[in-house]
Image (tube, rainbow, N blue to C red):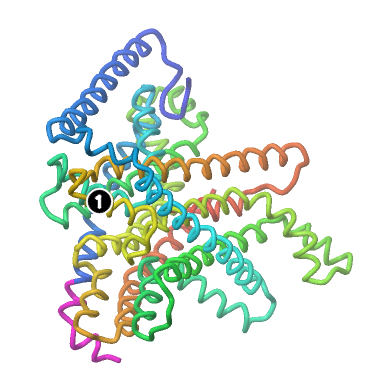
């Protein structure tokens, strides 16, 4: 049982290391892009709101695998492909995940009643002060728990890159299949690997939910 | 329009917004024009790339792919509902030996990547020669994952019914079975419906994972069609068509979810039925990805 893991340790190590890199890099990029899109959706400019809404509606209703397939096979036809499979996978994950982060940010901002900022403006705060002292600290509370869910889903979604020749953890079974190893044991170790990565995130999420639950 | 972030615009802000609006539209038009130009110079509008969609054999192929997608999604949806109902029932049971394992299983399947779940059935089938095709790997994978999420939705929905309802029912001498079946479920279901439907959208989208384990669903067919030399590798046209199909299907379901949400909110206002708070908080925190 352990020999499956120990004999193929480099394969597992490299696979999970790539998974973690995919997760962290596309997580950070999605946070940036998602927040920008979220800002679009709550902006006073109708065209910006339209761009944000359109982006979210298209991406949320498209399977991530299709986004991957388009970036891997379609973009090359327009000579727009990203430099290598790793960055293409990061691109697909970022494009998809930022639509969900955008929604989290938007609904987080919308949970605050306008009275809050009206009161803040009434005491003479500037836009920037209203945003940083009144709105964001409260929105943060509504944003953190669902944001953690999105990030957990992102970590699980990195496995899709395996279908597009990126050698992350999801691609281990195919490689092990060529080596003629026991597949179920391989999958069991991969599952354990993912649980090790995900369970702390879940606990972090529950903790954040409890901390921010004070209404 | 006033919002949390800005006040109702005055004359100067209105002018500023109008100018920004025009700038954004110009930039947007520029980006779209650039993409179309890019497609044009690399010959993506050539007739032979698009001609294939006129042929009935190609249309049938696409249709078969769509049918396979819907078959897997439909069967998995039914099985996932059953799975969810059984495990939700086990999770609210009074017996600890039923509750604990059910909770563990639900939490476990929600934490494992769906593709890995499908791999278990896909590679298990190869290793033990079970005679289960990739279709069943897709269906079982989807069932376990979405069933677990649905179990959580059901449980949260039932837990969100105000506790006075339960207490009153018990006070009348109903058994637990009757309390859940006659009092809690009928009230919980209307609050849960939107969440259930949006989970079904997720399920439909996730059938596309079948592409990776060679199940002949829509995306798999699209890849084959895109790889045809005769039509000049029409990847972009086929993916555009596929995306339109997926977006159309999912949007229809999303619209249904929105309609149900609106309806249950209206009903609640009229009859003063249970507030949705806990159920919606639990399910909206579960971002459907």
Q: Chain of mark 1?
A: A
Q: Quadrant of the N terminus of chain A?
A: bottom left
Taking the image as shown, residue A84 lies to the left or right of residue B89, namely left
Query: Which residue ends up furthest to the right in the rendered image?
Result: B172
Taking the image as shown, residue A140 lies to the left or right of residue B194, namely left
Work out whether residue A142 or residue B161 is closer to the camera in this orientation and state it: B161
Counting from the top left corner in percent of width and height, residue B200 is at 52, 54
Q: Secondary structure at mark 1?
A: helix
Query: Which residue ends up furthest to the left in the rendered image?
Result: A83
The number of numbered badges drawn on the structure is 1
Classify A4 as above or below B147. Answer: below
Quadrant of residue B271 within the rendered picture: top right
Counting from the top left corner in percent of width and height, residue A102 is at 37, 41
For the point 10% across and 50% down, which residue is it? A83
Counting from the top left corner in percent of width and height, residue B240 is at 31, 40
Counting from the top left corner in percent of width and height, residue A149 is at 41, 56
Classify B257 as above or below B183. Answer: above
Is residue A67 rendered magenta in the image?
A: no
Is residue A2 rendered magenta in the image?
A: yes
For the point 39% across and 32% down, which residue is it? A41
Quadrant of residue B156 within the rendered picture: bottom right
Classify A31 as above or below A109. Answer: below
Work out whether residue A12 or residue B93 is closer to the camera in this orientation and state it: A12
Dominant secondary-structure state across the stretch colored magenta: helix
Taking the image as shown, residue B72 lies to the left or right of residue B265, namely left
For the point 34% across and 16% down, which residue is it? B17
Query: Which residue ends up furthest to the front in the rendered image?
Result: B56
Mark 1: few/some/many CA within 10 Å (<14, 14-19, 20+): some
State the extent of the magenta-drawn residues as a range: A1-14
Residue that mark 1 sits on: A28
For the point 42% across and 15% down, which residue is it? B9
């Amino acid at each position: 049982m352990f020999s499956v893991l120990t004999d193929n340790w480099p394969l597992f190590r490299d696979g999970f290391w790539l998974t973690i890199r995919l997760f962290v890099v596309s997580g950070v990029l999605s946070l940036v892009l998602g927040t920008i899109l979220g800002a679009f959706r709550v902006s006073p400019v109708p065209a910006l709101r339209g761009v944000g809404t359109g982006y979210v509606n298209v991406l949320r209703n498209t399977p991530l695998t299709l986004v991957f397939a388009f970036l891997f096979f379609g973009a090359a036809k327009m000579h727009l492909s990203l430099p290598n499979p790793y960055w293409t996978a990061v691109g697909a994950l970022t494009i998809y995940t930022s639509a969900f982060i955008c929604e989290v940010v938007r609904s987080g901002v919308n949970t605050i009643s306008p009275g809050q900022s009206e009161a803040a403006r009434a005491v003479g705060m500037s836009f920037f002060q209203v945003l940083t002292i009144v709105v964001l600290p409260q929105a943060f509370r509504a944003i953190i728990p669902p944001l953690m869910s999105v990030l957990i889903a992102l970590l699980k979604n990195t496995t899709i890159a395996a279908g597009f020749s990126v050698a992350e953890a999801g691609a281990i079974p195919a490689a092990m299949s060529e080596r003629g190893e026991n597949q179920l044991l391989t999958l069991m170790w991969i599952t354990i690997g993912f649980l090790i990565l995900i369970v702390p995130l879940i606990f972090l999420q529950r903790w954040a939910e409890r901390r921010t639950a004070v209404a | 329009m006033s919002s949390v972030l800005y006040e109702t615009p005055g004359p100067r802000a209105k002018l500023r917004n109008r100018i920004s609006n025009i700038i954004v539209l110009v930039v947007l038009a520029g980006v779209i024009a650039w993409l179309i130009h890019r497609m044009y110079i690399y010959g993506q509008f050539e007739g032979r790339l698009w001609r294939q969609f006129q042929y009935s054999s190609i249309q049938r192929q696409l249709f078969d792919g769509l049918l396979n997608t819907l078959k897997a999604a439909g069967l998995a949806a039914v099985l996932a509902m059953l799975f969810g109902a059984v495990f939700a029932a086990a999770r609210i049971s009074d017996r600890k030996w039923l509750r604990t394992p059910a909770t563990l299983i639900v939490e476990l399947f929600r934490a494992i990547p769906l593709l890995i779940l499908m791999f278990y059935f896909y590679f298990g089938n190869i290793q033990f020669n079970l005679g289960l095709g990739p279709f069943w790997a897709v269906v079982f994978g989807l069932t376990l994952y979405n069933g677990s999420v649905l179990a959580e939705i059901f449980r949260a929905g039932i837990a969100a019914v105000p506790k006075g309802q339960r207490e009153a029912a018990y006070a009348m001498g109903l058994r637990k079975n009757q309390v859940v079946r006659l009092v809690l479920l009928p009230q919980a279901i209307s609050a849960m419906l939107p969440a259930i439907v949006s989970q079904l959208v997720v399920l439909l989208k996730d059938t596309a994972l079948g592409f990776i384990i060679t199940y002949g669903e829509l995306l798999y067919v699209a890849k084959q069609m895109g790889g045809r030399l005769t039509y000049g590798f029409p990847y972009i046209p086929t993916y555009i068509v596929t995306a339109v199909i997926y977006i159309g299907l999912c949007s229809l379901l999303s619209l249904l979810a929105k309609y149900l949400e609106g309806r249950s909110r209206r009903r609640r206002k009229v009859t003063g039925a249970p507030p949705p708070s806990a159920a919606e908080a639990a399910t909206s925190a579960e971002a459907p990805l």
